[in-house]
Image (cartoon, grey):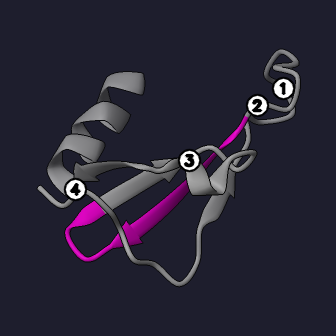
Amino acid sequence: MPRSVRVRHWMRHRAPPSAPDENGHCVQVAVAGRSVGLRDPKDPAGGSLVLPSPAWNAFLDGLR
C-alpha cells in the first residue's frame, strides 16, 4: 500500500447542515488512482492516511 498520495486537488468534506455542530471539524479527501487519501485541512503538512479504494468503499458502506 502506498504511504503517500500525490494529488492535484484535495476535496473538503463537512457534515450536512442538518448535523449537530461539530465545531467546524472536517477532513479533506483525495482520490488518486486506486487509493484514497485523507488529511486534516488544519495541518496539511502533517501527513495523510492512505487507503486502498476497496477499504474506503467498505468504510463508507459501514456508515450507511
Above or below: residue 62 compared with residue 3? above
Residue at left offset 76%, top offset 31% = 25
Q: Quadrant of residue 17?
A: top right
Q: Which residues are magenta?
A: 26-35
Q: Which mark is residue 25?
A: 2
- Residue placed under numbered mark 1 in the picture: 18
Name the secondary structure under disc 3.
helix
Please name which of the two marks, 2 or 3, marks the residue nearer to the observer. 3
Label whose residue precedes the other's in the sequence (2 or 1): 1
- Residue placed under numbered mark 3 in the picture: 46
Above or below: residue 47 compared with residue 17? below
Name the secondary structure under disc 4.
helix
Mark 3: amino acid: Gly
Give residue 31's position: percent from left, percent from top: 39, 68
Give residue 47's position: percent from left, percent from top: 48, 50
Which quarter of the rendered picture does the C terminus lie within?
A: top left
C-alpha distance separating marks 4 and 3: 22 Å
Mark 2: amino acid: His
Label whose residue precedes the other's in the sequence (4 or 3): 3
- Residue placed under numbered mark 4 in the picture: 53
